[in-house]
Image (spheres, rainbow, N blue to C red):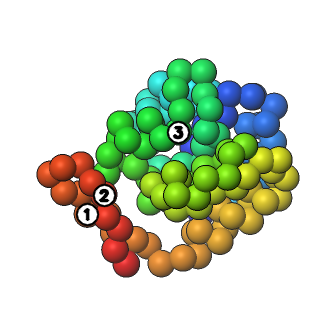
């Protein structure tokens, strides 16, 4: 099963996602800020990053940009805004309101997809190839 970092500043929501994902066999860690998420990503072998867009110390896009190619195999955004073009850096996204079973389903669907290989260029642009 996968190791997942849930980045969500509303602890009750994060715990709900953790309960759902743990029940189907995943190891789940919670980060309530970008800083905490960076620490978990630096110190654990994470397969899936599931993150809310707006966080107390930044947003999910800044987290992804800051990490460059050093991101988990799968990144999923949860957002209240529907701007597909803006979120291309993520493998998938859910638009709020989100039901916890939707979170479990999207994680499971993404894990079933072929693993993508990331290729980083000197200019920091990331391409993914199958």
Q: Find disc 2 in the rendering and name its residue.
A: 126
Residue 15, picture quadrant: top right
Mark with earlier residue (3, 2): 3
The N terminus lies in quadrant:
bottom right
Q: Identify which residue is drawn at 79% across, 36% down.
A: 13
The local crowd at label 1, few if under 14, some if 14 to 19, many if 20 or more residues have their Cα within 10 Å, is few
Comes first in the chain, label 2 or label 1 = 1
Mark 3 secondary-structure assignment: helix
Q: CA distance from mark 2 to mark 1?
A: 6 Å
Pick the residue in front: 87 or 4: 87
Pointer 3: what residue? 60
Mark 3 and mark 2: Cα distance apart in space? 16 Å
Q: Is residue 23 left or right of residue 130?
A: right
Label 2–label 1 contact, CB within 8 A: yes
Residue wearing tag 1: 119
From this view, report whether residue 17 is shown above or below residue 23.
above
């Amino acid at each position: 099963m996968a190791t997942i970092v849930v980045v969500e500043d509303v602890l009750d929501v994060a715990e709900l996602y953790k309960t759902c994902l743990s029940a189907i066999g995943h190891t789940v860690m919670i980060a309530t800020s970008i800083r905490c998420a960076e620490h978990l990503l630096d110190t654990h072998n994470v397969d899936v990053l599931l993150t809310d867009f707006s966080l107390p110390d930044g947003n999910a896009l800044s987290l992804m940009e800051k990490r460059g190619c050093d991101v988990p195999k799968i990144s999923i955004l949860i957002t209240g805004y529907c701007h597909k073009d803006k979120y291309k850096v993520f493998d998938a996204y859910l638009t709020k309101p989100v039901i916890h079973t939707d979170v479990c389903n999207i994680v499971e669907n993404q894990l079933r997809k072929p693993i993508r290989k990331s290729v980083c260029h000197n200019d920091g642009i990331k391409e993914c190839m199958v």
